[in-house]
Image (spheres, rainbow, N blue to C red):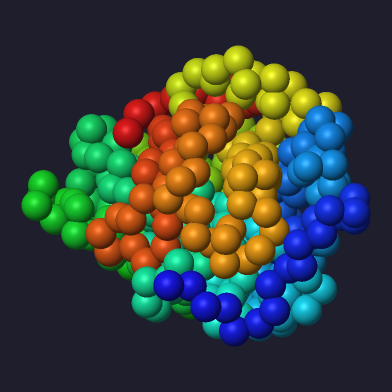
Amino acid sequence: MITPSSPSAVERTDGSPIRLGALVPLTRPGWVEAGRHLLAGLDLAVHEVNEAGGIDGRPLELLVRDTAADPERAAAAVDELAGLGVAAVVGEYHSVVARAAAARADALGVPFLCSSAVLDGLTEEPTEWVARLAPAQSRGWRIFADFLLSEGRHRIAVATQPSVYWASGTSVLREHLAPHGGTVVELDANVLTPEALCEALVEHDAAALLLLVGTPEPAVPIVRAVRGDRRLAELLIGAPAGQPEFAAWASALGEDGTGIPFLRYLPEHLGPLGERVAKELRERLGEAPSFVAFEGWDTVTVLASMLRSQGTDRPGVAGSWPRVAVEGTRGPIRFSRTPGIGVWQWTWAPIHVADRDPAAPDRLRIRHTG
């Protein structure tokens, strides 16, 4: 039974806006480009809902709060948004930030639909208040590990920084690769210079280097150093968290940024809805939309459907996760309980491994499908 510990949004029929809180990284050290794409998707979906008459004649209003990749800032934003009467909170990209937001939303009794964060343990305990569209890290990173094995890469090095997200990803890779004879060695990117990291890669005879680090620093200098080291000409560089998808990556690295596989939460081919939304997003962004932009659009579309059927009462919204059946940009969206995951989960968004084509850096090519 759901019993909120804070006042739920007030049911009204006077045409006043229905407020949704949106958590988005818009300033550094947050991943600003991902935040911009996420917000573009959220905004576009709100615009389309309102153009179609809103929710029973009431427009949606998006109250955007910049998390700047700061968990404390995100938790404070959830407090503020709850006090402003939002029907639900949406968004966030960074897993450690989303985890803080989810904990606060659970404590306050505010529905939270997480758009992009993938950390399996989004909450400490199972909750009825939180749902997620992005696939769990354990699923996506196992698919990436399968890709490495299919490429004959068994000796894996990870350049990493302290973070529960990177540590979790490393554990997933190690556990999935070990039965196939794969090994994972960790290299601390906060201690090793890019040049020292290259020396370590040679010493360990690594077949692949995975960038489990922030962007552009230190990811970009590491890529430049590895690409410039002739001893590492056959080394595969990978970035499972998706850095190479964004235009800033191509701008910073040019040809050096190509051929670096990453996880992309899109089908091989978009359907008619996905193609239409992709066109609209491209016009808003001035560039090809990333999967994060599609996650934003799907988020608002799911909640709009829930609000139409359940109203704005927070317990009613949170209680309707298992009844969601919405056509998203990447396929039909439904939520279920998944073993080991404490939130309502879309099982699963499509996943493939892609990279930037060395023959045409602006073009993405699919390397592996999960």
Is 303 situated above or below 95?
A: above
Q: Is residue 337 left or right of residue 219?
A: left
- Rendered location of residue 41, percent (x, y): 72, 41
Quarter of image, res 252: top right
Q: Nearer the viewer, residue 306 or 175?
A: 306
Q: In which quarter of the image is the N terminus?
A: bottom left
Q: Is any atom of residue 367 visible in this view?
A: yes
Q: In which quarter of the image is the C terminus?
A: top left
Q: Is residue 241 left or right of residue 296?
A: left
Outermost residue, top side:
272
Q: Nearer the viewer, residue 268 or 334?
A: 334
- Rendered location of residue 181, percent (x, y): 10, 50
Residue located 77% across and 43% down the image: 55
Residue located 82% across and 73% down the image: 84
- Rendered location of residue 143, percent (x, y): 31, 42
Q: In this view, does 234 lie to the left or right of 92?
A: left
- Rendered location of residue 120, percent (x, y): 38, 63
Quarter of image, res 164: bottom left
Q: Is residue 17 left or right of residue 248?
A: right
Residue located 45% across and 67% down the image: 128
